Amino acid sequence: MSAAVAFIAAPLAAAFLLPLLGTRPTWGTRAASLLTLGALFALGAWMLAGPVPPHVIVLGGWRAPFGISLYVDASSLMLVTLFELLALAALWFQHQHGQEKPVSFDVLVLVLMAAGAGAVLTQDLFNLFVFLEIATVAALALSAPQTGSPRGVIRYWLFSAVSGAAMLLGIAILYSGAGTLNLVDLGARWGRLAEPVRWLSGVLILLGFLVKMEIMPFHGWAPATYRRAPSSVGLLLSGVVTGLAAFSAWKFFALVLRGGTSLPPVSGVFSFSQALFGLGALTLILGALAMLAEKDGKRLLAFSTISQMGLVLMALALGNPRAVRGALFLVFSHALGKSLLFLVAGIAVSRTRRSEWGAWRGLGQSSRSLVWFWFLGTATVVGLPLVPGFWGKLSFVGGALGMGMWGKAGVALLIAATVAESVALLRVGHGLWEHADLRKRSGDVDETSAAAGAAPACKACAGVSYWAGALAISAGILWMGLWPATFTRAFADTAAAYAGDQPVSVVRTSTDAFAPRRDGQGQVKP
Amino acid sequence: MTKYLLPALVILPPVLGLLAAFLPRLLRWLLLFLTALATATVLVAVRPGEMMPFSAALPVDALGPALGLHLALTPTAWFFLVMSSLATASFTLFSLVFNDERHDSGIAPLYLALLGFGSGVFLAADWITFFVCWELASVLTLIIVGHRRGHAFSAGLWYFALSALGSLSLLAGAWWIALHNGSFRIDDSLVTLTGWVASGRAAAWPVLGLFSLAFLTKAALFPFHMWPAFAHAEAPDDFSPFLSGVLIKYGIYGLFVVWVPVFFHTPEGAVRTISGIPWPLYILGWVSALTAVVGTLMAIFTNDAKRLLAWSTVANLGYIGTALSAHSVLGTAAALFHLANHMVFKGAMFTTVAAVKWRTGEREMHRMGGLALRMPLTFMTFLLAIIAAAGIPPMSGFASKWMIFQALFEKQLVFQATALFFASTGAFLYLYRALHSIFLGQLSTRHEHVREVPFLMALPMVAFMLALMAVGFAPGLILKPVNWVLASHGLDAVRSNWTIVVGATAHIDFATLFGVFGFAAALVFLFFVLGGRRTKVPMMDNYTSGEDPADWGLTPERYQYAYAFYQPIRVLFSRIPLGATEALFARVARALVRTGSLVADGFASAAFSTWSILLGAALLILFGVLS
Amino acid sequence: MRFLNMLPQLLGVSFLAMGLGLLLMGLGRQFTARLQRRVGPPFYQAYLDVLKCFSKTSITHGFVMDLGTIMSLAGLIATAYYVPFVQWTPTGSGSLVIILYLMTIGYLGMAMGVSASGNPQAPLGIARALALMFGYKVPLVMVILAMIVVTGSSDLLAIANAQQGGPSNWFLLKFPIGFVAVEIAFQAMIGERPYDMMIAPAEIASGPMVELSGKYLGLAFLLHSVQLYVETALIVNLFLGGAANPATFFGKQVLVYLTSMAVNAVMARYRIEQGIAHLWKWAGSLAFIQLLTTKGGF
Amino acid sequence: MNVVPIVAISALLLFGIGLYGLWSGRNVLRWILAVGLMETGINVFLVLTGWRPGGAVPIITGAFSTRGPSPFIDPVPSALVLTSIVIGLGTTTLALALAVLHARAHGDLECGDDPENAEVLE
């Protein structure tokens, strides 16, 4: 069952072979990249069809905890399959609707996919760091604008470089204390580390994750980058990069920091929960308020991602099973919903050449699908009933209310943020649907699109890629919303497997065979 | 088959709505009307007892093994459903004709879905289904009120923000109780809540507060009374009757589902009482009385017909709230009775105003006038409706208003009764103003050619008129179902047969009242016929106290007194800040948006962003050290 | 059934109301004349005016005007059926809520009739009349609520019975503050100076009556007469304890009416907003005190 | 003399200089150099973590296979440094490319605020 490795190997192989077909983007290169992503998505779907026993793949024969092992279970496989779907939709959309991009665009997307799959599956801390760095480099290159000022992306590079360095420093300190890099092993030895080693390494490593998850003080790069990057890259950034950052942050948080345990009282191990919960709440409410004030469509979506990631961070910081299930649901629904919104934004920007959502008024008259998909995306992101976001928020509220005063404050902020966010997004949706005299604006669109020699953006029809991508994602949303049986089971098993205080869970099988035996209370005998 | 009737009532209309989205205009509105008619006939035929509750399990283990979605037809739900479905059937018939090519607002599919989720709110037996239907209903209402017009959408945002805030706090409240008693079912949570209230447990009041926030915002009671004026006035004209007649009653249904059982089943001494009423209900009483007064004053001074009717709805909900807070059998029955009456006469008024706007395209009251000559049937409907709305005897409004006052006299809530009398006198003022400005006085030259409404549109109007007179003649028509609802809550019924109702301090035979007024009218008509001949004279030919109108350049518009109608009263109330709550909520919204923009641009400057990494790291380290 | 054998009594009370009302008007005019040291018309002058009006031809502006005028008098006569004459009403009940609300039919009918006439001065007068109603209704209702709290019933018959046995236990003596408040409100109710701004002849050409001629004017006269009968009877029943026989009842009515005519003869007219402010300030505060003392707390 | 404190101080110094470089100016090249210095500082520290007192070069040849309890220094941090340098290379080249773009767009390397009216095409 080492098929899961294909998710890392295949994209890398395709990425390196693709330039051989030439740097000019011919239909051959495009078909190759799309085929790879499609095949991987099919593989993921096929693997998910049957039951997915959680299993460990040891790479290169080095037994743990020395070698690098991948832990594959149902929800991580689902997340990787989701990434493939999003990448497929984004790339195809870019080919048909976006500006002319060299072959390197497809290569970078494939590299991003490999890094994403790696970060989700790996069990080794440094290996996780490497995959995160690869994903950042790929995302940076993707979102760099070919013409005009790259200041937003430079700031993004600055943030990720410094956070990468900090994370490396954290890993170094952690390694000097614990002596191992395997996440599970680290969890076992975390109790015995010295106090300064623990909170210094913990802080520095978490800093790396928080920048990628765009949490409030570190989100400075996001709005400018999203605005200048093409919408398909925006889709990848908000769906894939934040998704993998959130999942790996949770893996680090659950395995190494003992899942943060409950908020109060701080039990011995330095638990960051209260700090992270506060940070997440701050991000949630300020992100939502920023959305209310935002006039620019793509910056609006950036702040929506920031706000949703704040909520995911709050759920992770809570730690109890119900909150973690909510977090996983929120990551999936946010990725799905946000990708729909970016597809619609992509079409709207390519039609009107302006990213202010005020300028998109009335676009829904010619192609009604923009309005339908925007409202479905909004419902998913905001968490209206009957769509996955609702299950996420429902279990989050349940988890949070059980956590005393902190939890109740969090729920109150969630209520305010949800109202602000739904108002902001519905406003844009209704703008699309409004009666607006389109003739005045469509006149000037013809000259610019002709002049810029963009891809044949025919005004009336929205391309096949838009329809295929949007319909596939909507199908995923409706399946996950109306009959989420498979998802709830998968998330419950993962939450149980990763929770530190469970009896010996499957996750541990990779190392326990070699680790010294434990005595009755689970204390490691010297 | 009856096992699947309840889910069909909830799921079928939205599915039909989806189908309707692809149908041509006329078929869409026809489908809407037929669905509403079918729902009405089914509900009237069915009795609350016979319906089996329906429940389905969704594989989401939010709480227990599987999240259950339960639907049940309780007598309260049955009453609300029958009343609203009958009203909706007539509104949709009106919409069928109203939406010709020129006026099509294109909301038929959304309207259909709203009907489904609306009945879902009433049928829900557990809080999750209740929340799902409630939330979807408010989103659909927002989009319908917006109906592709920017300013209408921002008017609808008032409604949506408040109702979303309310529904999410309802979910939080439901969770709070579910964490303690392990179930989302409404009756379980009410038993727990009653237990908490009875045992005086501290957690009872925040939970009750969370539930009530949802219902107060939807029922537009005092702090949240400003959204109807925006939402009803800007909504599509044929949707306003539904919005103001039916949709705003969900809040009252919520109060019925939570407050009535909780406070009627708590033992006497458990909750501190003020003048014999538990203190939350006493506060609700004063809040509702204040809503009635503010609603009336705002209605008197507004110059837009739909906004006037919206404020009148707010005032009527104030009456219903006050009646409900009398904490007595009579009060609860009066609330239900007035709710049903309001659905009919407010629906009639909004329908007539919509018909006038359909014909003349006018909405500002000072631009209309004299339409009674061109649209007599619409005029008669509006006349009977305002007689009922002002609570004047022969019509249905009087019976429910009288019962409200009987409930207040029984509990000696005299100051609330005074507030309601003040409001009902004010009601007469603004209703007469609407009647005069729209239908009486000079007919302007622009409306010379206006014709009466077509037959199909006249049908619902005649239905409203008959309903008003029938209930006025025999209040038992509505009091019988009301007694079933009271019985389901374990309260004893209001003593009444078809035409006689016994209140706390007096009893009235409504048939004699109707007959007596008829006899007097016949007598006076006899006098009228005996009098001298009368000759018909054109409207413009009247007494101008000796001056020659020709040299003023007189036109019918200039000869119509309708603009600042109650200017003297405006002067009286000039010192009282009437629009204070709207201004307060607008200021709060602007402040939120300003902080948002501060955050949005705050982090954009390059210098600050380098700092924010260091700031963030320092923040995290600080927390690390502290924790 | 019961309603059919009630018809003759209804007819009787209608003519009684109109007859006594016109008589009151006649006596009132004579009383004012005597106050102003002039002879004044005979007491039966009102009857003559009504008959003259009905005999003359008249003009109308449409069916709404006829409907309104008929409806107004019908409403007032229906109210008369509920006001106890001598501890007796034809319909058997004297519910105060019915009386208060039936009276408004009179206003609505008159308002609708005259504003359908097309002359802007009529709705201007009606706007003033309704604003004034806004002013006097609240104090009146507050005092009535105090009565209901005391007697425990909202039926005028019961309230009148509670005051039997001589003037010592009339509510006039038990609730003097309430009585003064209602007196002021009564002054506004029947539209006598200083509250006759709705038919202010100098300002708005007698307001609502501007377009009425012939039988419409006659009906308006009858309306005013029945209104006088009903409102004086209301005061008599509320504060003077009704009466054993018709003569004393009518005597009390005349007494009440002449006091208000006395005030009317000497007072000047208020502006409309001053009138309402005055009503709320004096009548309102007195009634509030009365209600607060009788109820003893909010 | 014990070499560990000297190496630790030099790593810290390098990291400090890098941090100062970041904070003090807005020039993109300055930032790239500063990040490079920080990463070198961290790599030095990484190598330091693998140091064992009296440990030998971690290559197993016949003579050293059976020496005492921990004959070798820990090789893993050195491996980590290798990867970290490669990653540093990747990010720095990307940053240089961005600097070129910045120079082409703005004529200089002073990275100020994002221009508001920057045209958006897709």
Image (tube, coloured by chain):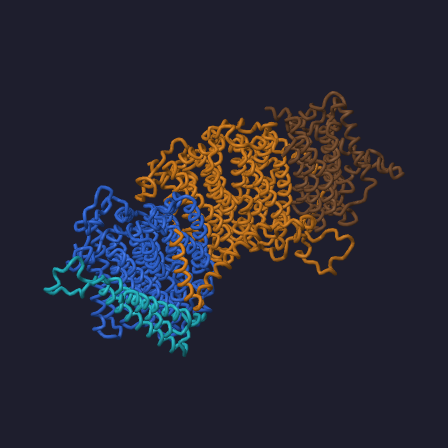
Chain colours: A blue, B orange, C brown, D cyan
Residue B55, by quadrant, is: top left
**From the viewer's perspective, is C125 left or right of B41?**
right
Position of residue A296 measured from the top left corner of the image (x, y, whole percent): 44, 64
B201 over B350 or under it: above or below: above
Q: Nearer the viewer, residue A309 or A355?
A: A309
Q: Nearer the viewer, residue B313 or A140?
A: A140
**From the viewer's perspective, is C159 left or right of A268?**
right
Q: Nearer the viewer, residue C164 or B62?
A: B62
Q: Residue furthest left?
A: D62
Position of residue A15 measured from the top left corner of the image (x, y, whole percent): 23, 68
Q: Nearer the viewer, residue A499 or B133?
A: A499
Instruction: Please report the residue visible at 51 percent of the width from the left and 36 percent of the height from the top.
Output: B336
C277 over A26 or under it: above or below: above
Position of residue C126 measured from the top left corner of the image (x, y, whole percent): 70, 45
Residue B295, by quadrant, is: top right
Q: Residue furthest top?
A: C165
**From the viewer's perspective, is D61 left or right of C135?**
left
| Residue B514 visible to an observer of this rendering | no
Position of residue A148 measured from the top left corner of the image (x, y, whole percent): 39, 74
Q: How many numbered circles does the render carry?
A: 0
C156 over A324 or under it: above or below: above
| Residue A411 visible to an observer of this rendering | yes
**From the viewer's perspective, is B557 left or right of A411?**
right
Q: Quadrant of the N terminus of chain B?
A: top left
